[in-house]
Amino acid sequence: MSLAEFALIDRIRARTAEREDVLLGIGDDAALLQPRPNEHLVVTADTLNGGVHFPDDTASFDIGWKTLAVNLSDLAAMGARPAWCTLAMSLPDASPDWIESFADGFFALADEHAIALVGGDTTRGPLSLSVTAMGQVARGQALRRDRAQVGDDIWVSGTLGDAAGALQLWQRGELNVATATLLADYEALRLRLLRPIPRVTLGLRLRAFAHAAVDISDGLLADLGHIAARSGVGAEVDADALPLSAALRGVLGRDAARDCALRGGDDYELCFTAAADQRDALHALAESLRLPLTRIGRIVDGQGVQCEGERGPGGYQHFAD
């Protein structure tokens, strides 16, 4: 069974709610939005393709969640408060059950972060989901990649490498990403791959402490390298300081887990730099958010990212060969 385009749009629109900052939402040629005064508009866009950014058999709920999560992570890295988004969908078959489950995942995260879906597009074709997300940040408060300073500490949130570890297990045929497993460590890694947690609240709080920030989508070494390049500095990472989950260490072992943390992607944690005199404040922030923040290195004169005993920067290649 397939849905006509307008019926599909109606199903999505039925999940949205009226808001004062959305003057005209889904149903017209474009949306009319009301930004807050004295704030900059922050805009990001990401596309997820079936078989490239997630396995083809991924549950539609998880696809809906991740489609929005990767964009919210970009807003978090900028210290922006989510406001609005659009969704463009290319679908091989618009079955009602798939759409409803996708919407359940998408709006579970959208409602949590008060971001309104205000428009988009639908077409028939290979599975591809594109979101443009918009946030707002007070003038002069946006976190950027080009503000790291020599002497800064380098920090990361959460644990690293879990998504890459799940990917390795899936590639080896040891993990079915489409269904839950009773093996606790494997399930923890599976959920980290399919339902990343965008660190929106952390990003908002970091505006008071951080000099530069980036979200870890392509691997720590690669993404920290963006900060170093944009800021004209070098970065030194202590591989032994990397926060590794017990699940990742237990399944892959310490060395493989560390490699996932350095070069794996899809973590969507935040990497940021801050002055050394902010350490106590950041430890207090971590406690208040109940989110680990770990100091893993420092910003130095020079260029590039150095990690003793490691090969050098590498990036995430998603699910492609």
Image: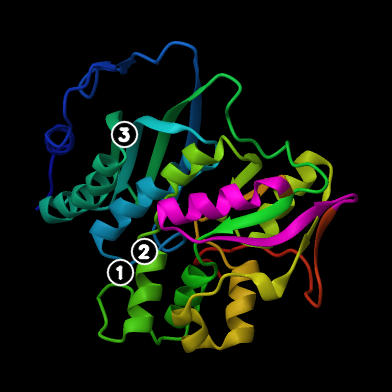
Q: How far across and how far down the image is residue 113, in percent? A: 32, 40
> At 38% across and 82% down in the image, what residue appears?
185
Q: Which residue is mark 1?
A: 57
Given the current orientation, which residue lies at the most extreme top position? 37
Residue 82 drawn above or below residue 140: below
Q: Amino acid at mark 2?
A: Leu
The crowd level at tag 1 (other Cα within 10 Å; few <14, some 14-19, many 20+) is: few
Other residues around mark 2 within 10 Å, as few (<14) / some (14–19) / many (≥20): many
* In the displayed structure image, the side of residue 313 where residue 17 appears, left or right: left
Image check: 170 left or right of 124? right
In the picture, the disc for residue 115 is: 3
State which region is magenta: 277-303
Tell me if residue 221 comes above or below residue 281 in the rendering: below
Q: Nearer the viewer, residue 56 or 193?
A: 193
Tell me where residue 94 appears, x and y as whole percent.
19, 49
**Left-right relation of 138 to 14:** right
Which residue corresponds to the image point at 65% horizontal and 60% vertical from the top-left? 295
Q: Is residue 39 left or right of residue 97?
A: right
**Residue at the spot of label 2:** 194
Q: Image quadrant of residue 120?
A: top left
Spatial distance from mark 2 to mark 1, Cα to Cα? 12 Å
